[in-house]
Image (cartoon, rainbow, N blue to C red):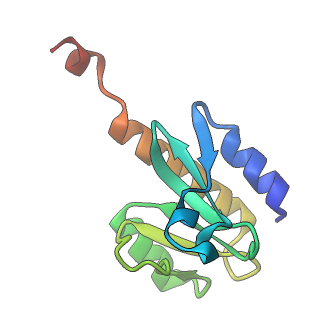
Amino acid sequence: MDIESFRDYCLSFEGVTEKTPFGKFARRYESILVFYVLDHMFCFFDMDDFTSVTVKSEPEVIEELRQTHYSVSRPLNQSLRHWIQLDFNGDISDELIWRMVAEAYRLVRDKYTRSPRAKRK
């Protein structure tokens, strides 16, 4: 898995933007690249240490993956309870990582997309 292909994949989803928002908190976070849909994060990784990606997920999926893969862990920021870190070059396939990124995108997009009925109110 290479960083440019991964970045291109994330940007291939409709309405996705990217930012490096965490440098303002600490210089060591300047290299964290975050992908957004509807102004909400769905995945991020460190451009200087491209060894893992952190994605938004459902709690039951997180638990299942943590029980079945050693290269799946909690993100460094423990307050991100609906997030999971997927380590590259471990026992999780690139195909599953791609699917987890796509699911993270859908999860966030669907949560923040209002239904036509809600827009009329």
Screen quadrant of the N terminus? bottom right
Place of residue 14 in the rendered image (x, y in percent of width and height, measured from the top left): 60, 31
- Image x and y of residue 6, in percent: 76, 55
Of residues 6 and 92, which is closer to you in this image?
A: 6
Residue 84 x/y as whole percent: 49, 71
- Decide which of 17, 72 is in the foreground and name it: 17
Along the horizontal axis of the image, is 111 left or right of 16? Answer: left
Residue lying farthest to the top in this orientation: 120
What residue is shown at x 46% (from left), y 80% (from top)?
74
Question: Is 7 located above or below residue 61 in the figure?
Answer: above
Placement of 32 over or under 121, stated as above or below:
below
Q: Residue at x 39, y 37 (%)?
A: 110
Label tally = 0
Out of 37 and 18, give the one closest to the viewer. Answer: 18
Residue at left 22%, top 16%?
A: 117
Q: Position of residue 27 (x, y in %)?
A: 61, 73
**Residue farthest to the bottom, as pictured:** 70
Residue 57 image-quadrant placement: bottom left
Q: In the picture, which quadrant includes the C terminus?
A: top left
Q: Residue furthest left?
A: 121
